[in-house]
Image (cartoon, rainbow, N blue to C red):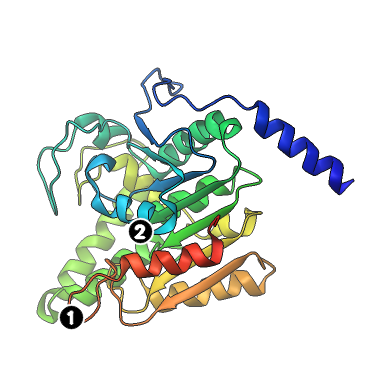
Amino acid sequence: MMKAYLLLVVLTFLSAPAAAANERYYREDGTEIRYYLDNADAENLLVIFQGSDCNSVRHMKSVNTIWEAFDTDSALLTIEKYGIDDSLAYASGERDDCPADYLKHDTMAQRIKDGVQLIEALRPSYREITLAGGSEGGSIAIGVAAQIPNLHAVLALNSGSSSFQHDVEFSIQQTVPTEQLDEVLNGFRQFVKQVKDSDEPFPIEVSGHGYAFWKDAFARDLLQPLREIDAPVLVMQSADDESVDPERTRQEVKKIIAGGAKNVSLRMMLGLDHGFLDSSGASKLREQIEYAAAVIGTK
């Protein structure tokens, strides 16, 4: 039986068409899903999802670092968020030129849906498919993986706990001066209540996101998909992260593993922050991805 299965896999791979980097794919509303497929003729595919920012994935240097450190011989699929393409210049931090379509339509749910659609369309061209993402991108990676069987592996980097609201409050507590903390926390909690209680969208732009994003994010259990993935999953969490709660993340992931998700493993990265910087400000992203490649890579 096993020999017959392996033969079927080999025949399927040999007969699979080469991936087309210029093929167009569209959402149900008729808008085009912008994506980039580098090294398209490779044997394996690495899909990398960017974090929570209003930038083109094409301008994110960390994406190339992950690709190079994990498996530069693989094809690389990256997907733009709704309403963004590479004509949007890179900007760090808050910005006032986020596209209106992005603010109106970008949500985790939409990113997951776009990812599933593209990966399912491209998968006949590749032997193995690995998903990776950092911060919000890690949540997207596990959300997509829960809907696609027979992936090679999934890598979630500093994606945090099950609760988006909790992680934002944790970040506020770590970064806001003590004399302002109560005011900022109360203001955020009022904002959360306003969004959760609303039945109709209202115009907001908070931290580069519109109403739809916040409504979706506050309703999600971000770690629930870990229970539904059949591929190996490596969750890597920086212990000194101030953007998400590392201790709550550790506890929740351990509980999921203890509950039966034996395909999930957790690595706590001591001495590193959300951006993989150590106490001296040196980036350790490459070496951490090299570790991940040794554990779940295709080589």
Q: Dot 1 corresponds to which residue? A: 280
| Rendered residue at 60%/31% (across/down) | 124
- Quarter the N terminus occupies: top right
- Residue placed at 55% from the left, 55% from the top? 298
The residue shown at (18%, 73%) is: 175
The x and y percentages for residue 97 are 11, 37
Q: Residues within 10 Å of mark 1 (few under 14, many from 20)?
A: few
**Quick check: marks 1 and 2 in contact, CB under 8 Å?**
no
| Residue that mark 2 sits on | 135
Look at the numbered disc 1 and give the secondary structure of its residue. loop
**Residue 224, image x, y percentages:** 56, 58
Q: Is residue 163 above or below residue 11?
A: below
Q: Relative to 15, is 199 on the left or the right?
A: left
The amino acid type found where label 2 is placed reads Ser
Mark 2 or mark 1, which is nearer the start of the sequence? 2
- The residue positioned farthest toward the top in the image shown: 30
Query: Which residue is nearer to you in this view: 201 or 96?
Result: 96
- Kind of residue at badge 1: Ser
| Horizontal side of residue 93 vs 214, given as left or right | left
State whether residue 125 appears in this view: yes
Q: Could you say which is closer to the camera, residue 113 or residue 276?
A: 276
1 or 2: mark nearer the eye:
1
Q: Residue 147: image x %, image y %?
A: 59, 43
The circle on residue 180 is none
Residue 160 in sight from this viewpoint: no
**Front-most of 85 and 260?**
85
Q: Is the C terminus in the top left, top right, bottom left or bottom right quadrant?
A: bottom right
151 left or right, relative to 205: right
